Image (cartoon, rainbow, N blue to C red):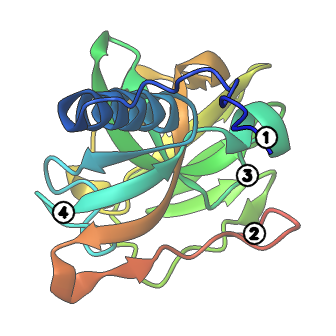
C-alpha cells in the first residue's frame, strides 16, 4: 500500500509569549467587566458608620442588585455618589424609601410614624429632624454614627441613579472579614 500524504493543513502553534499575552488580555477584560457591572471594592473613609464599619476598612459592593434584582430597602448599607460632589463616594444606611415620611425626635428615627428598627451597632444622637417625605426615585440615608455623620439630614435624599451598589461584606482587614447583615424581606432594619 502506498503512503498517502497527510492532507490536513499545518497548525501553527502560538509562541509561549503570545499565549501569555492573550491570557493576560482576557483576564484584564474579564476583571474590567466584573468591576464595572458585578462587584467592586470600596474603602470606608471617616467615622460616620462606626460601630458598623470603621475608617479604612474595605467592603465588597454588589453593583447589579439594584439594576436587576430589587430596589433598595430600609436597612441596606449602600455606596452612592455624594449629591453635592458626585465624584466622591459615600457609604450610609437606607432608613426610608420613596413615599416614606422620616423624622427624628429625641434622636429616635421614625419612619411613617413607627420607630425605625435600628441595627444594634447604630450610635444614636440627640436631636430632632423633619418630618420629610422621601420623593420618588430616592432614598433617605443616615450614618450609623448619627452624631458624626453628614447624611440626608444635611444633603437631602439620594437619587436612585446615584447609588453604586449594596455593601455586602467587609473584606479588609482580614481579621474582620464578615458579611454585612441584610435587612428583613419586609424592609425592617
Label whose residue precedes the other's in the sequence (1 or 4) = 4
- Residue 80 occupies quadrant: top left
Indicate the secondary structure of the residue bearing disc 3: loop
Q: Please tell me in which quadrant of the rendered image residue 56 appears.
A: bottom left
What residue is shown with label 4? 57
User: Callout 1: few (<14), some (14-19), or many (20+) C-alpha neighbours within 10 Å?
Assistant: few
Answer with mark 3 or mark 2, whichever residue precedes in sequence: 3
> How far is mark 2 from mark 1, CA to CA?
14 Å
Q: State the separation of the CA atoms marked 2 and 4.
A: 25 Å
x%, y% of residue 138? 68, 25
Which numbered disc covers residue 71? 1
How far apart in space, not on screen, are marks 3 and 4 (Cα)? 23 Å
Give the position of the N terminus as an image quadrant: top right
Q: Nearer the viewer, residue 61 or 32?
A: 32
Please report the residue visible at 70 percent of the width from the left and 24 percent of the height from the top: 7
Q: Which residue is mark 2?
A: 188
Callout 1 secondary element: loop
Task: Return the x and y of residue 64 as percentages of the image width and height.
Answer: 66, 38
Q: Which residue is mark 3?
A: 73
| Of the image marks 2 and 4, the number of the one nearer the N terminus | 4
- The answer to whether any part of residue 152 appears in the image is no
Q: Residues within 10 Å of mark 3 (few under 14, many from 20)?
A: many
Q: What separation in Å lies between label 3 and label 2 (alpha carbons)?
A: 8 Å
- Which of the marked residues, 2 or 1, is nearer the chain's N terminus? 1
Amino acid at each position: 500500500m502506498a503512503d498517502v500524504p497527510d492532507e490536513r493543513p499545518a497548525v501553527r502553534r502560538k509562541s509561549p509569549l503570545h499565549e501569555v499575552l492573550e491570557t493576560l488580555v482576557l483576564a484584564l477584560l474579564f476583571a474590567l467587566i466584573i468591576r464595572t457591572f458585578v462587584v467592586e471594592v470600596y474603602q470606608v473613609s471617616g467615622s460616620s458608620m462606626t460601630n458598623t464599619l470603621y475608617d479604612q476598612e474595605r467592603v465588597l459592593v454588589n453593583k447589579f442588585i439594584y439594576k436587576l434584582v430589587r430596589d433598595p430597602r430600609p436597612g441596606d448599607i449602600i455606596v452612592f455618589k455624594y449629591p453635592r460632589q458626585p465624584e466622591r463616594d459615600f457609604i450610609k444606611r437606607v432608613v426610608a424609601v420613596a413615599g416614606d415620611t422620616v423624622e427624628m425626635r429625641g434622636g429616635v428615627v421614625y419612619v411613617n410614624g413607627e420607630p425605625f428598627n435600628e441595627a444594634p451597632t447604630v450610635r444614636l444622637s440627640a436631636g430632632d429632624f423633619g418630618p420629610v417625605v422621601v420623593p420618588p426615585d430616592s432614598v433617605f440615608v443616615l450614618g450609623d454614627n448619627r452624631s458624626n455623620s453628614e447624611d440626608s439630614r444635611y444633603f437631602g435624599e439620594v437619587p436612585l441613579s446615584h447609588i453604586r451598589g449594596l455593601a455586602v461584606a467587609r473584606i479588609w482587614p482580614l481579621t474582620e472579614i464578615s458579611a454585612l447583615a441584610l435587612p428583613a424581606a419586609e424592609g425592617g432594619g
